[in-house]
Image (tube, helix red, strand yellow):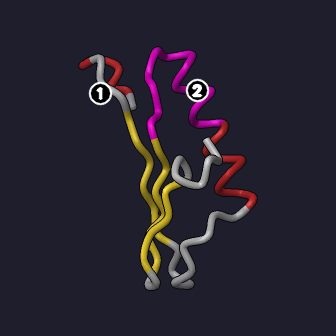
Amino acid sequence: MARNQQLGKPAGVVHNHPSGDPTPSRADIDMTKEIIESGKRLGIAVHDHIIIGKKGHVSMKGLLLI
């Protein structure tokens, strides 16, 4: 995120769920909200958080969670 701040660019978050189920956990949702708030303080817009699993991927923005 620091590099994005220097460049004035937005950021995204991507991680995997080794279990294979890409459904966001409560911890994923809470962490994403914290990252978004931190980004706002730094002037960085976080556009999405994507979770990848064996069964595909999920966009938290697509699920209207952010």
Q: Residues within 10 Å of mark 1 (few under 14, many from 20)?
A: few
**Residue 17 % position (x, y):** 52, 74
- Which residues are drawn in magenta? 34-47
**Residue at image coords 63%, 64%:** 24
Quadrant assignment for the C terminus: top right
Q: Amino acid at mark 1?
A: Arg
Spatial distance from mark 1 to mark 2, Cα to Cα?
Answer: 14 Å
Q: Secondary structure at mark 1?
A: helix
Quadrant assignment for the N terminus: top left
Q: Is residue 37 left or right of residue 1?
A: right
**Residue 30 % position (x, y):** 72, 47
Q: Amino acid at mark 2?
A: Ser
Vertical order, 27 against 2 (above or below): below
Q: Quadrant of residue 22?
A: bottom right
Q: Is residue 21 left or right of residue 52?
A: right
State the residue position of label 2.
Answer: 38
Q: Residues within 10 Å of mark 2 (few under 14, many from 20)?
A: some
Q: Secondary structure at mark 2?
A: helix
**Residue 5 % position (x, y):** 35, 20
Q: Does the segment drawn in magenta span residue 1?
A: no
Q: Is residue 7 left or right of residue 59?
A: left
Vertical order, 13 against 26 (above or below): above
Q: Which mark is residue 3?
A: 1
Looking at this view, name the residue that lies furthest to the left: 7
**Residue at image coords 38%, 35%:** 11
Vertical order, 14 against 5 (above or below): below
**Residue at image coords 40%, 42%:** 12
Q: Does the segment drawn in magenta span residue 46?
A: yes
Vertical order, 54 against 33 (above or below): below
Q: Is residue 53 left or right of residue 31?
A: left
> Number of labelled discs?
2
- Asked if labels 2 and 1 touch by Cβ distance under 8 angstroms, the answer is no
